[in-house]
Image (cartoon, coloured by chain):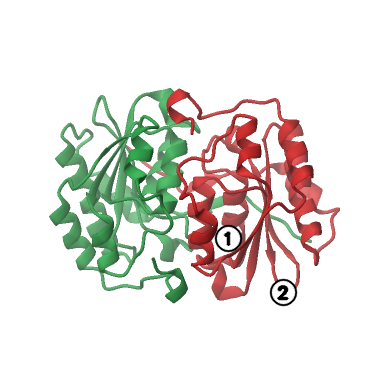
Chain colours: A green, B red
Amino acid sequence: MKHWTDIKLPIPNWINTWTTGIQETFPEVEQRMALTIDLARINLKYGGGPFGAAVFNKRTGELIAPGVNWVIPGKSSLLHAEVMALALAEQTLGSYELASHGSFELVTSVEPCCQCLGVLVWTGVASVVCGACSEDAEAIGFNEGPRPLDWEQELVRRGISVTREVMRPQAVEVLQSYIGEIYNVNPKNLS
Amino acid sequence: MKHWTDIKLPIPNWINTWTTGIQETFPEVEQRMALTIDLARINLKYGGGPFGAAVFNKRTGELIAPGVNWVIPGKSSLLHAEVMALALAEQTLGSYELASHGSFELVTSVEPCCQCLGVLVWTGVASVVCGACSEDAEAIGFNEGPRPLDWEQELVRRGISVTREVMRPQAVEVLQSYIGEIYNVNPKNLS
């Protein structure tokens, strides 16, 4: 007899230890991006992918939820950095729609792939801030999957603002330091 | 002090009760689609959305994992039917890549929105079978979000086969019986 249990997506243990040492608010966008790049960099040491993200309250700069790429250790293809941060933010607020609780910003060390783009649209975030560009991720072998070519404009016309290339060089540096597995990629799966 | 816990995405209690009464394998595609339409129909009685999905082993027709739209009861915008079925399938197999465990098919009562499209690409499913079309969901007020116009071809060129309009009238009937909330939609968010 089949029996299914609730879906559990693990987050790394180190995240809660590490965040005890950081400030509570991040008023400047460079501070918010620096946090996500730090998340990506530290994540590499623990066997995760070179991607970090976080959700912030736009008004106060408060960190609502962090995220890292935990696909391989967490055994779930859902566990991209943006998805972890957004799902943790919804869990923290107890809501399927962030917009009903204020104005929230998703900051991500690399532009969102097809999965993260699709997920963020329905969370109700007000804005997205990106560090490295898609071509930077593709340069080390990852690919972004089937997104609309004008994904930025698709978000903007839904009322979600987009800012790109914030601290891009620092975000690229973390990408280029990754020497782990490029997963879910085969000749057929490449862009 | 902030503290985050693992992400928990609940599945409806009724699913395990209900699946005790069904067969174990579904060799014909119409049987697989009928199951997902049943999931969608029953889900409405429990306060979920009019969408059902399931992952099957392509070789044996075995049901690996069911899914329904549980966004509002489960308080997570991730809980679309396809995402639930795919995440449960990965959890059942203990893997972030279904393709390394065999050949799996995602059957969905309605064509995937941007989120479900993005999620399915990275799961490693071999094929997708759809019932109702995107315009059927849009006709009752849902929208599919920013997808590539040629999303079917985008999947095919990644080695994922797509079959559309299997038992479309029956799937549409469930959509049209929905009288609940159309969430995460405002004028800016409409296609």
* Residue B91's disc number: 1
Residue B71 place in picture, x, y as percent: 58, 37
Residue A117 place in picture, x, y as percent: 40, 46
For image coordinates 14% across by 55% down, the residue present is: A170
Which is closer to the viewer, label 2 or label 1? 2
* A184 relative position to B70: left or right: left
Amino acid at circle 1: Gln
For image coordinates 19% across by 38% down, the residue present is: A23
Q: Which residue is labeled 2 in the image?
A: B59
* Count of residue discs: 2
Give the Cα separation between the discs numbered 2 and 1: 20 Å
**Which chain does tag 1 point to?**
B
Give the camera-side residue of B179 and A52: B179
Q: Vertical placement of A128 versus B63: above or below?
A: above
Labels 2 and 1: the sequence-earlier one: 2
Query: Are the residues tagged 2 and 1 within 8 Å (C-beta)?
Result: no
Q: Residue B25, can we see it?
A: no
